Structures are given as C-alpha cells and as structure tokens.
Amino acid sequence: MPKPRLLLFSDLDGTLLDHDSYGWSPAKPALQRLAASNIPVVLNSSKTAGEIRAVREQLGNTAPFIVENGAAVIIPANCFGPGPEQVRSFGASRGEVLALLAECRAEGFQFRSFADMSPAELAGHANLSEPEAELAKDRAGTEPLLWEG
C-alpha cells in the first residue's frame, strides 16, 4: 500500500454498520468513492481482531485496524512494504486483565466475564451466533463483564 495522504477512521457498530442489521450497504457508495481516491478506511471498534477481520473481508478493506477500543493496532502483512502482520498492543495483556479480575473476585466482586462463559452462553447474552461468540471471546487486551453485584 503506498503511503496515503489522507486516512479516514470509522467506528463500526452504529456508524459504518447499521445499528440493527449490521449491514453496510448504505455506506457502499462512500466506501467506493474513498477507494477510488486511494483513501484508506481504518476501522476502529470494540470488536476483536477476528470480528473485524470478518467485516474487513466483506468490505474488501486492507488498511490497518484498531481493535478492542484501542487495545491494539493491527497492521496487515505487506501493508507498507514487504513484511508480516504486526500487532502493536497498548496497555495490559488479556492475561494481566484476567489476573486483576481474579483479585477482584477474591475481594468479593461479583461478575461473569467472557472468559467465564461458553460460546453458547455468550451468544445468548450478546445476541450473537456461536461462531460470532467464539470470535468475541478471542480477546487481546480487554475483558467485558456482566456485572452481578
């Protein structure tokens, strides 16, 4: 990908993707115009890398993307010249987050996290299919909670 002069950053849920249907067809003319002008669209979302990869495939998007509300930036392979995919993480790893949550549980806080739930259970809570729940559970640096306290 040649060095762009302009970039467009977009959230997904309720912005590029319709809030109810998750469809992106209303944005298609704008995305085509951006592509024709060589303006990359950098997706930014609370979604995981796997979830965003699925959306990027539908959109034909090849630009870097931001996952889990800024927990990491993914730079696709060969994006700025030859080389492998790069993941730039910011903040704590998911392992560190889960360790802190274990300490919170030991202090009496009551919650269930994505790590505590099976894909079927998460699918029921989050209105996802089980394959989508699997992608949502594969996190890099964040851990959503269902508060029970």
Image (cartoon, rainbow, N blue to C red):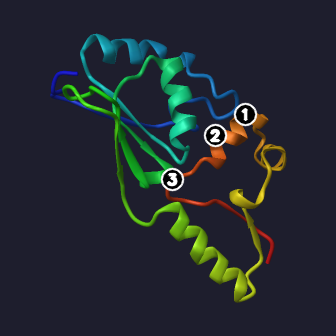
Query: What distance separates the C-alpha of mark 1 from that of mark 3?
Result: 18 Å
Q: Residue 138 placed where, x, y %?
A: 60, 47
The quarter holding residue 114 reads bottom right
The quarter holding residue 123 reads top right
Sequence-wise, which precedes: disc 2 or disc 3? 2
Query: What distance separates the C-alpha of mark 1 from that of mark 2?
Result: 7 Å
Other residues around mark 2 within 10 Å, as few (<14) / some (14–19) / many (≥20): some
Other residues around mark 3 within 10 Å, as few (<14) / some (14–19) / many (≥20): many
Whether residue 27 is visible to the viewer of this picture, yes or no, is no
User: Which numbered disc covers residue 131?
Assistant: 1
Relative height, residue 116 to residue 58 (above, below):
below
Residue located at (55% from left, 69% from top): 97
The answer to whether mark 1 and mark 3 are in CB contact below 8 A is no
134 and 24: which is toward the camera: 134
- The mark total stands at 3
**Side of 149 relative to 7 (left or right):** right
Screen quadrant of the C terminus: bottom right
Whether residue 133 is visible to the viewer of this picture, yes or no, is yes
Residue located at (56% from left, 51% from top): 139
Other residues around mark 1 within 10 Å, as few (<14) / some (14–19) / many (≥20): few
Amino acid type at circle 2 is: Leu
Q: Residue 107 placed where, x, y %?
A: 70, 89
Amino acid type at circle 1 is: Pro
User: Which numbered disc covers residue 13?
Assistant: none
